[in-house]
Amino acid sequence: MKRKQPTKSSPLSRSGRFAHGMSVEVQRFSESISFDWRLWRHDILGSMVHATMLAKVGLLTEAELKAIVDGLEAIGEDIREGRFKWKPELEDVHMNIEAELTRRVPAGAKLHTGRSRNDQVALDMRMWLRDEIRLLGDELTGLQRSLVALAARESKVLIPGYTHLQRGQPVHFAHHLLAYVEMFDRDRARLEDALERVNVCPLGSGALAGSTLPLDRSMVAKLLSFTDAKGRACLSANSMDAVSDRDFVVEFCAAAALIAVHLSRLAEDLVLWSSAEFGFIRIADAFTTGS
């Protein structure tokens, strides 16, 4: 097979050290922009706050800060309106935004001062996951309220209680529904517990060993809402751990898997109850499909 020649472009992440661009094959293999573009809001917010901190400690002028923030806001607007062109050759969401910012605003070249893509991506992932956990928790709360309302409305209805699809004992329909409320309570508790470990600011860790610059990590953490119940900054304690471990993602996936199991159980009950063999409930056509 004829090998394709390396690309001529040399993205910011390879400038200075590499004499040639990345081969097309490696580029396709290593790009993540096809899915990590979802982090753009958090990437831009994190960069704005990082720039604000750099100005506060004297590493950016106020004019440079304004130019950077204005540039990031304009890029965010372009992304929202679908005008921004994502470039796979720039690998990921971070380099796409930074390259475009630097093209528009010369001061953008200073934005990465005291920061690495390693702590930047760790920050973005934590911010994104934090939002998703809270959203999922709210959705579960809404489902629980609906189940409680239905249980209260049908509190006197009796149905057979089954073991292995064999009728065992009569139970209240409400009792069956409230079993799921309990399951989802534990699910929300697991999410809240995981959130405590997600809500830790890694920025300032650099590539792996921090920075000698006078960065104000607490300021960044507080501005990005990485705080505890008393308003204190929640900061990563070890820079190598902060940029290299994603156990908080795995922990969320485990909690999400249990939520999916409980939702699947509820869905299967609805399938059985709406069948001709059971006939306990009817589901509106708007919420059903054919076989």
Image: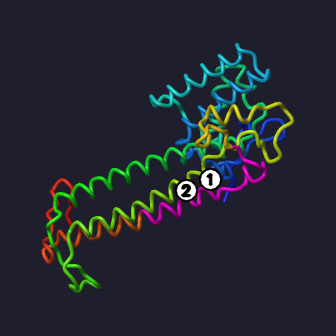
Task: Tell me which residue sits at (78%, 52%) in the image.
Answer: 240
Furthest toward the front, the residue is 230
Q: What's the magenta bit mostly, secondary-structure-wise?
A: helix
Q: Is residue 6 visible?
A: no
- Residue 167: percent from the left, percent from the top? 20, 85
Question: In which image quadrant can residue 247 be found?
Answer: bottom right
Residue type at mark 1 is Arg
Residue type at mark 2 is Asp
Question: In which image quadrant can residue 266 be found?
Answer: bottom left
Magenta residue check for 236: yes
Magenta residue check for 6: no
Residue position for label 1: 197
Q: Give the answer, above or below, for where 118 lies relative to 191.
A: above
Quarter of the image with the N terminus in it: bottom right
Question: In which image quadrant can residue 115 be found?
Answer: top right
Q: Give the answer, above or below, for where 228 lies relative to 165.
A: above
- Residue 87: percent from the left, percent from the top? 59, 38
